[in-house]
């Protein structure tokens, strides 16, 4: 006779698993847990039979953020409630620290076609602070008499001074 309840059997058949983290019940897919990598604790837990929820004595609020990270490869806005160190400590415990470090890394500067710019110079004081481009009919154009019509700010990590 099968010891699994009908609910557990249905969840296992659908590729779902239940985890009890710090007293809060989470239900997710096995593929989400395995996305943490083959050496992660969560991947190892995904190989267990779906009988009773596995109890993990950790902070459920931080776990929720890490589970969201595994689902989307991005940190949810609720992650701001915790320090990076708190998130890293929990990610290390679950073996998904590389995914978290990737999500915490500054985003790359995308969307600028460098071929539109003829000269790249630092500002006079050597502190990079602006991105300047001439806008002509909704697209970047060549300068006329050195005038700049539009200035767009960018983050401190990605700052560069571009003059055309």
Image (cartoon, rainbow, N blue to C red):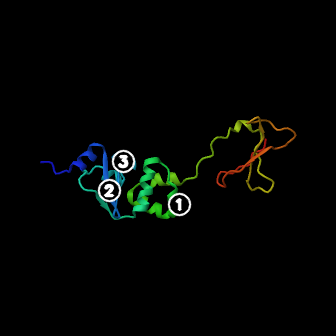
Label 1 vs label 2: CA separation? 24 Å
Q: Position of residue 161 (x, y in %)?
A: 74, 48
**What quarter of the picture does the C terminus occupy?**
top right
- Residue at 76% from the left image edge and 34% from the top image edge: 137
Q: Earlier in the sequence, mark 3 or mark 2?
A: 2
Q: Give SS at disc 1.
A: helix
Tag 2 residue: 19
User: How many circles with numbers are drawn on the protein?
Assistant: 3
Closer to viewer: mark 3 or mark 1: 1
Q: Residue at x 47, y 48 (%)?
A: 73
Closer mark to the observer between disc 3 and disc 2: 2
Q: Nearer the viewer, residue 64 or 124?
A: 64
Front residue of 94/63: it is 63
Task: State the SS at label 3.
Answer: helix
Q: Which residue is mark 1?
A: 80
| Residue 39 rendering spot, x and y as whole percentages | 36, 51
In the rendered structure, the answer to whether residue 124 lies left or right of residue 96 reads right
Q: Position of residue 106 (x, y in %)?
A: 58, 52
Question: Which is nearer the eye, 115 or 143?
Answer: 143
In space, the residues marked 3 and 1 are separated at their CA atoms by 25 Å
Which callout, 1 or 2, points at the residue further toward the start of the chain?
2
């Amino acid at each position: 006779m099968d010891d699994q309840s009908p609910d557990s059997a249905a969840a296992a058949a659908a590729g779902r698993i239940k985890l009890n983290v710090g007293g809060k019940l989470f239900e997710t897919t096995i593929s989400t847990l395995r996305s943490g990598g083959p050496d992660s604790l969560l991947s190892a837990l995904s190989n267990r039979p779906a009988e009773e929820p596995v109890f993990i004595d950790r902070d459920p609020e931080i776990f929720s953020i890490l589970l969201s990270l595994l689902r989307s490869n991005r940190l949810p806005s609720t992650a701001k409630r915790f320090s990076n160190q708190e998130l890293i400590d929990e990610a290390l415990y679950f073996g998904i620290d590389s995914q978290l470090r990737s999500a915490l890394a500054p985003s790359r500067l995308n969307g600028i076609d460098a071929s539109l710019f003829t000269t790249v110079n630092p500002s006079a004081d050597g502190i990079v602070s602006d991105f300047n481009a001439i806008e002509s009919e909704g697209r970047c154009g060549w300068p006329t008499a050195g005038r700049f019509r539009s200035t767009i700010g960018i983050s401190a990590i990605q700052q560069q001074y571009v003059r055309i």
